[in-house]
Image (spheres, grey):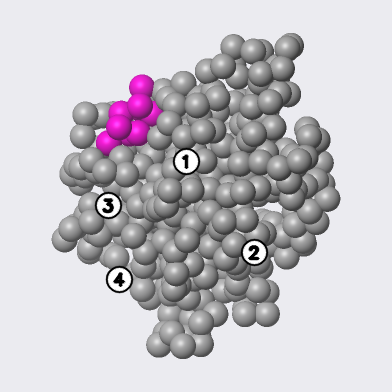
Amino acid sequence: MASVVFYFQVHQPFRLRRYSVFDTDRHYFDDQKNGEVLRKVAARCYLPGSRVLLDTIRAHNGKFRVAFSITGCALEQFRKHAPEVIDAFRQLNDTGCVEFLNETYYHSLSFLYSREEFREQVEMHRELVKQTFGKEPRVFRNTELIYNNDLAHFVSHMGYDAVLAEGADQILGHRSPNHVYRPPHAPRLKLLLKNYRLSDDIAFRFSSRTWEQWPLTAEKFAQWVNQINGNGFVCNLFMDFETFGEHQAADTGIFDFLRHLPGEILRASSENQFLTPGQAIDRYDPAGEVDVPHMISWTDAERDLSAWLGNAMQSNALHELYKLEGPLKEKGDEQLLEDWRKLTTSDHFYYMCTKHWADGEVHKYFSPYESPYDSYINFMNVLDNVQTRLRAEA
C-alpha cells in the first residue's frame, strides 16, 4: 500500500521598500509591490491551482486529499489584496478532504533565537487557522522544515501529534523516508519525512528538458509511487504550492499533471490511497526512531541552515534583530511589535545569501534585490529606525 501525503506550503513575505540610511518613515513595507506580486501569483497559481484541486477532489468522490500550511503573512495579504484566494481555500476546506497545518505566523526563524517568541507566533498562527477555517491543527511544520530533536520535544509539549521534516540522507542513512517515525524523547509525537527525490521531481525538475526523465507524465510518476508498495507505507510529497503555475508555468503542463496524477496513482494499485498528515499518523505506527541532533531543513543542497545563516551578514542581522525582542516587548507598542515581527520573516535573511552555482541562482530568483549586500544594507537601515523608535519616549 502506498499512502500518498500531499502537503503544500503557501507563503508570501512582507517585502521591504528601499530604505536609505537617511529615511525616517515608519512605513517599511512596499505595499504596492507586495500587492502586485500577490495578485500575480494568485492569478497564476493560487486560484487555478485551487480550482484543479477542488475539481479533482470532486471527480474522485473525496478519495483525493491534501494538506496546506498557509502563513499568517500570506493570509493577511490575501485579505487585503486578493480575498478571493481565501474563498478558494475555504471551498477546499468545505470538501472535508483538506487539512490545515500549524507553523510560525511570520514564517520566522524564531525557534533558533527565542523559544518565547516561537511559542507566541505559533499560538498566533493556530488561532488564525481556527478563525479562518474552523480547524484546530494537530500537525506542525516549522519554517522551511527546519527541524531537530529539540524542536520535536518542544512542539510535543505544545500538544501536537506530529511534525513534518525533510527526509535528508544524513539523518536516514540506509532507511527509507516512506515510513512514519518517532523522534527521541518525545514518545507520543510522530514524524513524517519528505520524500525529497519524488517531491523535487515535481517541484524542480518537472520542466527541465535536460532531465533524463523529461517529460514527466502522471502515469510515469504514478508508477514510481507504486514502487513504494512493499518498501514502505507513505509517500510524503511536500512542496511549495507556488510550484503549480508560478515556479512551473502553466504552459509546461503542470496543471494537467496535477489533475491526472490522483487518478493514475489510484489506478496503479487498488491499495493506493491519499491521506492527510493527520490521517497518516492515525493509520501507521512508527517504524523506528530518527535521531536528528543537528538542525536540518528542506532548503538548498546542504539541507541545513546555511540558506539563512551561511555568512556574517545574515548572522549579524539576526543577532541584532532578536536583541531587540525583550526591550521591545517591555515597551508595549503594538505597532512597533508588529513591524518587528514582520522583520523576523526568514525571507529577509534568505535574500542575504551569498551562495553560488545552482543554489545561488534559486536565491537570486526569489530576491527583489540586486545583490545580497543590498539586501543586508536595506534591512539594517530599517532595523536602525526600529531601534530609534524603541528608544523614543512612549
Q: CA distance from mark 1 to mark 4?
A: 46 Å
Say which amino acid is labelled 1. Asn
Image position of 177 with respect to 112: above or below: below
Range of residues picked out in magenta: 149-157
Who's the residue at 30% across and 29% down the image? 153
Q: Is residue 187 left or right of residue 379?
A: left
Which residue is tagged 4? 227
Q: Is residue 159 left or right of residue 371?
A: left
Q: Is residue 32 left or right of residue 300?
A: right
Q: CA distance from mark 3 to mark 1?
A: 39 Å
Could you tell me which secondary element the residue under label 3 belongs to? loop
Can residue 216 be seen from the camera position used here? yes
Q: CA distance from mark 4 to mark 3?
A: 14 Å
Q: Are marks 1 and 4 in contact (CB under 8 Å)?
A: no
The dot on residue 370 is: 2
For disc 4, the neighbor class at 10 Å (few under 14, some 14 to 19, many from 20) is few
Say which amino acid is labelled 2. Glu
Who's the residue at 23% across and 52% down the image? 171
Could you tell me which secondary element the residue under label 4 belongs to? loop
Image position of 389 with respect to 4: above or below: above
Which residue is tagged 1? 316
The N terminus, quarter of image: bottom left
